[in-house]
Image (cartoon, grey):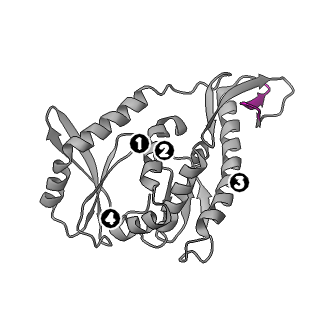
Amino acid sequence: MHAQDRKPQQHSFAYGDEEITFTLRRQPSRVVPRVAIHVEPDGRVHVDAPSTAPLAKVLAAVKKRSRWISQHVSAAKARLAHVLPREYVSGESLHYLGRRYRLKVVVEPEASVKAYMRGPFIIVAVPKHDTTTIRSALDDWYCQRAREVFAQRFLVIAGPLQWVQELPPVRLRFMQRQWGNCSPAGRITLNPWLVRAPRVAIDYVLLHEMCHLKHHNHSRAFYSTLDRHMPNWREIKEQLDERAAEYLR
């Protein structure tokens, strides 16, 4: 969730009958010699390692976790297999702040295009049933909601963080695989679709990115800071990853 120090490289190796492929991200600023392995919600594998660590040592560390990686990649692919592509028709399931709503498309020839929430429904009014128009209206609605929710939660999360003297510049950008990232200059980019997740998951992502304002890496110091301000973040991240395929589609 942060800007990498070097261009990532692809590597792979055999594990039984399968091939495990991972992206190696070299980090000159990573002072901890430990190799960190991450399996993303879509099954991609990222490995963070210091720039001084020999490739052979990195490969040995990754191969040692082959079984763990294989299990998590398989679980991610299984979750994705059950997620159907969205058709933008009435009755489809939508999420907002972790709660499930139903899409209701209202077609009225004189209607102005707009989306709004009413009871258990997220309603989209359109002059004719056009998938692109419905999707655009929903994206605009989620963006507006995301701006409001993120602004509120940033104030809450930033309060106890002594290294945050003022809120960082923030922009929204729809992303297929990331919830957010933090540039070396301290600008945070967030995925509006994160507003589909529960508030506690939103808080975790915001805290994660603000910790990168202090530690521009995934070092032990970074995780210690994250642990100190949100001791149960691993459980929250696991739950978010389990629903990522639904929230990101």
User: How far across and how far down the image is residue 173, in percent?
Assistant: 57, 51
Q: Amino acid at mark 3?
A: Glu
> Which comes before the other along the chain, label 3 or label 1?
1
Q: Do the residues bearing badges 1 and 2 touch, measured as CB atoms within 8 Å?
A: yes
Q: Look at 60% across and 62% down and name the residue there.
A: 170
In the image, residue 183 lies at what x, y percent?
48, 65
Of labels 4 and 2, the one closer to you: 2
On the rendered structure, is 167 left or right of 42? right
Which of the marked residues, 1 or 4, is nearer the chain's N terminus? 4
Q: Residue at x 45, y 67 (%)?
A: 228
Q: Of the numbered discs in the image, which one, if any, rests on residue 41?
A: 1
Res. 72 image quadrant: top left
Residue that numbered label 3 is attached to: 148
Q: CA distance from mark 4 to mark 2?
A: 28 Å
Specify which label sits upstream in the sequence, 2 or 3: 3
| First in residue order: circle 4 vs circle 3 | 4
Q: CA distance from mark 3 to mark 1?
A: 26 Å
Q: Which mark is residue 6?
A: 4
Is residue 26 located in the magenta-colored stretch of the structure?
no
Q: Is residue 33 above or below residue 235?
A: below
Q: Amino acid at mark 4?
A: Arg
Q: Which of the two labelled residues, at mark 4 and mark 2, occupies the earlier sequence position? A: 4
Q: Toward the viewer: 89 or 235?
A: 235
Residue 36 at what x, y percent from top left?
28, 58
What span is in magenta?
Answer: 118-127
Distance of label 2 from label 3 (alpha carbons):
21 Å
Q: Position of residue 114 (x, y in %)?
A: 78, 36
- Check the image and report above or below for 184 versus 133: below
